[in-house]
């Protein structure tokens, strides 16, 4: 886990510097040209950098080992950092809507020149590279923080493309496209907020994280196990906690039942490396008039 967090931090630092360069270029160009769409896009890019910093703080906390006050570890702090990204996006969304509304009501035509269009095209290419790099790293490391940040930057790609098209339109004599592009930026930002909120709510709301049937197949492959029930999983994609009730023959000695439960736990954690811990409650199978349970297979485990 320590190595994993180090890799996440490395990705965030690299992306941070790229986002800062893009944001500064867009904001400078936007204020120079008077294009509200470029300024909005620049501040959108600036929040990429702010979210990178929030992510670095979240990772520094999440990598701490479990302690007396956090027996399940600090992993959810990374998810909380992804919510910080969403908060930054909401603030930018409000700013973009206000700026677009003012331009629509007051009018005005920004200064558009070929060098500015070229600069926006370059920033678009940089954003495409950042999204691809961060998505690959997020999937490899199973980090919802990197994936959330990539979604944020991906919305930047879409907005930059829309702004670039609007600038060309303004250059051709259609100034109304500038505030309309800013409104489109707002739409992309809102969609990114919704996606991040959905992913974070799955983790913080303890939504089921693993397929129950796949877990059941591993459990029931252990000799001596009759079945299992009350399978529950929670956590994040790379940091999952599992608990279940394990059915063993009611005549199994306590020490043998305990040993068999450890075999089940070891097989589960070997098959699913994303499991951080497995808690097993041992009990006999339920007795109902019509229920039929197979005889435990395999010899008793050695004492």
Image (spheres, grey):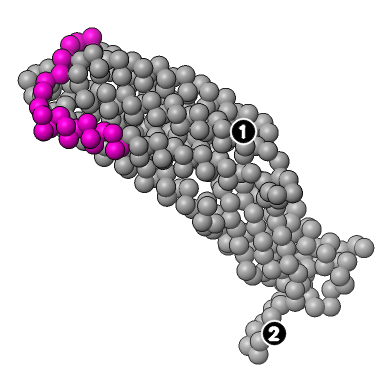
- Mark 1 burial class by Cα count in 10 Å: few <14, some 14-19, many 20+: some
Q: Is residue 152 magenta?
A: no
Q: Which mark is residue 60?
A: 1
| Image quadrant where one finds the C terminus | bottom right
Q: Quadrant of residue 96?
A: top left
Whole-percent x, y for residue 212 in the image: 58, 61
Q: Residue at x 73, y 45 (%)?
A: 67
Main structural element of the magenta stretch: helix, strand or loop? Answer: helix
Looking at the picture, tell me which residue is in the foreground, 26 or 4: 26
**Nearest the eye: 75 or 241:** 75
Q: On screen, 156 above or below 90?
A: above
Q: Can residue 291 be seen?
A: yes
Residue depicted at 67% across the width and 31% down the height = 3
Ranked by sequence position, the earlier of labels 2 and 1 is: 1
Q: Nearer the viewer, residue 223 or 162?
A: 162
Which residue carries the number 2 mark? 287
Residue at 23% across / 13% down in the picture? 32
Looking at the rendered structure, which numbered label has been put on residue 165?
Answer: none
Residue depicted at x 86% and y 66%: 256
Q: Which residue occupies the extreme bottom position in the image?
A: 289
Quick check: 271 above or below 233?
Answer: above
Look at the image and give the residue range highlighted in magenta: 93-116
**261 over 276 or under it: above or below:** below
* Magenta highlight on residue 111: yes
Residue sitting at the far left: 173
Give percent across and percent down for residue 153. 39, 31
- Disc 2 is placed on an element classified as loop
């Amino acid at each position: 886990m320590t190595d994993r967090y180090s890799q996440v931090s490395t990705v965030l630092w690299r992306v941070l510097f790229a986002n800062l360069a893009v944001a500064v270029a867009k904001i400078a160009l936007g204020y120079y040209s008077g294009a509200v769409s470029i300024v909005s896009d620049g501040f959108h890019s600036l929040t990429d950098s702010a979210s990178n910093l929030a992510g670095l703080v979240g990772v520094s906390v999440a990598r701490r080992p479990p302690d007396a006050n956090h027996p399940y570890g600090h992993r959810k702090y990374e998810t909380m950092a992804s919510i910080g990204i969403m908060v930054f996006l909401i603030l930018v969304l409000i700013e973009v809507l206000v700026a677009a509304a003012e331009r629509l009501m007051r009018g005005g035509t920004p200064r558009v020149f070929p060098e500015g269009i070229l600069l926006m095209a370059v920033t678009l290419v940089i954003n495409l590279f950042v999204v691809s790099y961060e998505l690959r790293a997020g999937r490899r490391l199973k980090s919802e923080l990197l994936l959330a940040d990539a979604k944020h930057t991906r919305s930047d790609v879409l907005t930059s493309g829309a702004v670039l098209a609007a600038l060309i339109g303004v250059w051709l004599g259609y100034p109304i496209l500038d505030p309309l592009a800013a409104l489109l930026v707002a739409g992309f930002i809102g969609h990114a907020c919704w996606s991040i909120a959905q992913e974070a709510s799955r983790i913080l709301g303890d939504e089921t994280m693993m397929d129950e049937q796949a877990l059941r197949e591993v459990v029931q492959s252990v000799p001596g196990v009759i079945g299992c029930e009350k399978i529950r999983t929670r956590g994040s994609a790379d940091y999952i906690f599992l608990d279940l009730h394990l059915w063993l023959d009611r005549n199994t000695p306590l020490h043998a039942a305990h040993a068999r439960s450890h075999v089940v736990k070891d097989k589960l954690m070997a098959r699913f490396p994303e499991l951080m811990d497995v808690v097993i409650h041992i009990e006999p199978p339920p007795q109902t008039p019509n229920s039929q349970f197979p005889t435990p297979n395999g010899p008793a485990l050695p004492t």
